[in-house]
Image (cartoon, rainbow, N blue to C red):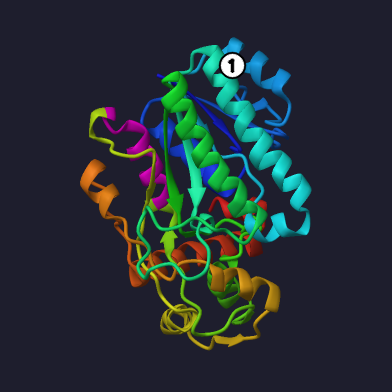
Amino acid sequence: MKTLVTGAGGQVGAELVRKLRQRGETVVPTDRVVPEGADENYRALDVTNRGELDELLAQEQPDVVYHLAAVLSARGEENPQATYEVNQTGTYNVLEACRQAGVRRVVFTSSIAVFGPRVPDPTPDDAPLSPTTMYGVTKVAGELLGAYYEHRYGLDFRGVRFPGLISAAEPGGGTSDYALYMYVEGVRRGAYEAFCRPETRIPLMYMPDGIRALVEIGQAPKSRLTRCVYNIAAFSPTAADIAQSVERALSRVSIAFSPDPHRQAILDSWPRALDDAPARRDWDWAPAYDLEAMTEELVSELRAREGDERRGPREAGG
């Protein structure tokens, strides 16, 4: 099976490519800019350019496309027009190009940003979708457009709504980045001032669980799926809970809170927790990490990375 990944240069994309290759799949990573040192299979692709998509799909003939290319929430509010172009026009281009090229399956990454204020707690899959950001608006439209392509053209469209994802990689402009920065700056400087209130609570997930969810939804038998896009959940700590977990793992660390009104408003519009019962029922989804398990592994990885950077490239390999 050959898989093409859009947005492979992002946090999720790079980890997904690595995971799929570990499983023995042939993977074609793509992004607007080919990273320095990328292998020969990496392709430059701007999803807003339909001609590039058509040409690349005709050349590579993938069986599955994982569509990850997107501008995230906080960065998206800095330039809503560009966010629409990448997220909305890009998703339409991918779906239409896949339809015409005969790609049999598209796996889509959606987000808790599709929801708006005043949703049930925990929030089920079919809660009203009333996003307050351009990122959320385009993810709602992407979900609906994919479902249309499945109904109208028979394209196998499926995806997950990610909580805030946390990994050791540098954040990509998401509003949940306060959580990761507690770890990064806690290890690096011993202090961090979070841009949210301590009682802020949103769904979060450790990156290895997020990547596994993408692989599992991509491989799930179509006969078992009862919907196109699923909530997936892991844990929903308050910002203060995360700070306390970091403080338990690190000695002499200080985490304070200084809410940024704009980003806090986005956080307040998101669900506090997700109900992911359909994913657990239909394709046996279950997270492997809770907050404390993530903290233990993440702190260890960040310490190792920080040590490598301080030693420099000649010493980093031991």
Element class at badge 1: helix
Q: Is residue 38 above or below residue 96?
A: below
Helix, strand or loop: magenta stretch: helix
**Residue 266 at x, y percent in the picture:** 61, 68
Q: How many marks?
A: 1
Q: What residue would you read off at disc 1?
A: 57
User: In this image, 254 relative to 108: left or right?
Assistant: right
Confirm whether residue 14 shows in the render. no
Q: Is residue 19 above or below residue 205?
A: above
**Residue 228 at x, y percent in the picture:** 38, 38
The residue lying at 77 percent from left, 47 percent from top is 81
User: In this image, 238 relative to 101: left or right?
Assistant: left
Please tell me whether residue 234 belongs to the stretch shown in magenta: no
Query: What residue span does the magenta drawing correspond to?
Result: 210-222
The residue lying at 72 percent from left, 31 percent from top is 48
Q: Quadrant of the N terminus?
A: top left
The residue lying at 24 percent from left, 42 percent from top is 282
Q: Is residue 195 above or below residue 206?
A: below
Categorize mark 1 by other alpha carbons within 10 Å: few (<14), some (14-19), many (20+). Answer: many
Please tell me whether residue 211 belongs to the stretch shown in magenta: yes
Disc 1 marks a residue whose amino acid type is Leu
